[in-house]
Amino acid sequence: MARPSGFGAKIANRQKEGKKCPVCGEAIVHLKVFKSVSTENQSVKYNQKMVSVCACNKQEIFN
């Protein structure tokens, strides 16, 4: 049987949150955003880009 993880392992996983925003102090989450674009010949193309999101710029990205 596998040995259960100890208290130290649980604390180490909680500290892997990543970078914090210098403006608001919230954790920065990296997302892939897809945007549909119509082309000249009436077809749809999807542009994708990686975006860093926190509480500061959440409304700008999702609206």
Image (cartoon, rainbow, N blue to C red):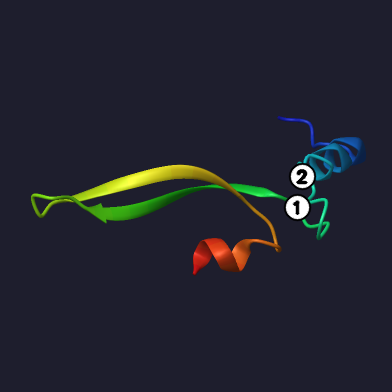
Q: Nearer the viewer, residue 12 or 58?
A: 58
Residue farthest toward the front in the current orientation of the protein:
40
> In the image, what residue type sits under mark 1?
Ala
Seen at 49% across and 69% down, the residue is 63
CA gap, disc 2 and disc 1 = 7 Å
Report x, y in % for residue 59: 59, 68
Which is nearer the N-term, disc 2 or disc 1? Answer: 2
Residue farthest toward the right in the current orientation of the protein:
8
Position of the N terminus, as image quadrant, is top right
Numbered disc in front, either 2 or 1: 1
- The reply, left or right, for residue 58 in relation to residue 43 is right
Seen at 70% across and 62% down, the residue is 56
Q: How crowded is mark 1: few (under 14 residues within 10 Å), some or many (20 or more)?
A: some
Report x, y in % for residue 4: 79, 37
Residue farthest toward the left in the current orientation of the protein:
41
Q: Residues within 10 Å of mark 2 (few under 14, many from 20)?
A: few
Q: In this view, does 15 lie above or below 57?
A: above
Q: Nearer the viewer, residue 14 or 44?
A: 44
Report x, y in % for residue 2: 72, 30
Seen at 85% across and 36% down, the residue is 9
Q: Which mark is residue 36?
A: none
Question: Helix or strand or loop: what does disc 1 sit on?
Answer: loop
Report x, y in % for residue 11: 88, 42
> In the image, what residue type sits under mark 2?
Glu
Residue at numbered disc 2: 17
Seen at 78% across and 57% down, the residue is 26
Give the number of callouts: 2
Dot 2 and dot 1 residues touching (CB under 8 Å): yes
Residue at numbered disc 1: 27
Question: Helix or strand or loop: what does disc 2 sit on?
Answer: loop
